[in-house]
């Protein structure tokens, strides 16, 4: 990439990057939206999200789905993957993890609309699902279902 590249500010893409030890250490980056002014959805899915219980240190597992309508920016995917991976050693309740991720994305991109669904696998017999959206989606937008089935145990 040259100094005149629109991606010159992106520091992680195209090179080796160490996994951040915590979400506070993670560097979340953005790139320009190539279709500013059009309403379309970007979906980010992490079926193997992990974090730690802040009290017991036991691992927690979730399937995370994020949909957003970009305004001027997109999240750069490598930096996003590194952010999600940084939660593996981070003690955080399900609700806090979900809302932290949403806040980081909204703060970085200022999207037109964003929603997050985190579908947590049970510990102690109770699955916890957390949902949030920034506002109502644009009226002309087709919003697909997240299609993550509720936890059923062994059936």
Image (cartoon, rainbow, N blue to C red):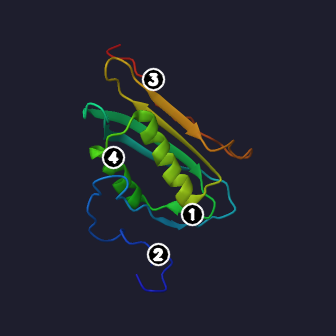
Label 4 packing within 10 angstroms: few (<14), some (14-19), many (20+) = many
Q: Residue 48, how many percent across, how many down?
A: 33, 40
Q: Which residue is drawn at 69% across and 62% down?
A: 37
Q: Residue 80, how many percent across, how many down?
A: 41, 56
Pick whichever of labels 2 and 4 is earlier in the sequence: 2
Q: Residue furthest right?
A: 139
Residue 28 versus residue 132 in the image, above or below: below
Q: Which residue lies furthest to the bottom in this view?
A: 3
Structural distance between the alpha carbons of marks 1 and 3: 32 Å
- Numbered tag placed on residue 101 in the rendering: none
Pick whichever of labels 3 and 2 is earlier in the sequence: 2
**Residue 13 seen by the camera:** yes
- Numbered tag placed on residue 87 in the rendering: 4
Residue 96 versus residue 75 in the image, above or below: above
Kind of element beneath mark 1? strand
**Residue 147 seen by the camera:** no
Structural distance between the alpha carbons of marks 3 and 2: 40 Å
Label 2 packing within 10 angstroms: few (<14), some (14-19), many (20+) = some
Residue 118: quadrant of the picture: top left
Structural distance between the alpha carbons of marks 3 and 4: 23 Å
Residue 130 versus residue 45 in the image, above or below: above
Of the two numbered discs 1 and 4 in the rendering, the one whose residue sits closer to the viewer: 4
Assess whether mark 4 and mark 1 are in contact (beta carbons under 8 angstroms). Answer: no
Residue pointed to by mark 1: 73
Pick whichever of labels 1 and 4 is earlier in the sequence: 1
């Amino acid at each position: 990439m040259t100094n005149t590249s629109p991606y010159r500010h992106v520091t992680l893409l195209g090179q080796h990057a160490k996994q951040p030890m915590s979400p506070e250490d993670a560097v979340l980056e953005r790139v320009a939206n190539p279709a500013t002014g059009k309403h379309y959805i970007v979906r980010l899915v992490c079926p193997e999200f992990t974090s730690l219980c802040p009290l017991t240190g036991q691992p927690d597992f979730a399937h995370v789905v994020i949909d957003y309508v970009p305004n001027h920016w997109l999240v750069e995917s490598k930096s996003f993957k590194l952010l999600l991976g940084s939660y593996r050693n981070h003690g955080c309740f399900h609700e806090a993890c979900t809302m932290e991720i949403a806040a980081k994305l909204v703060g970085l991109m200022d999207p037109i609309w964003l929603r997050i669904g985190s579908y947590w696998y049970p510990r102690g017999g109770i699955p916890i699902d957390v949902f949030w959206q920034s506002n109502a989606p644009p009226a002309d937008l087709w919003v697909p279902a997240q299609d993550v089935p509720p936890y059923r145990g062994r059936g």
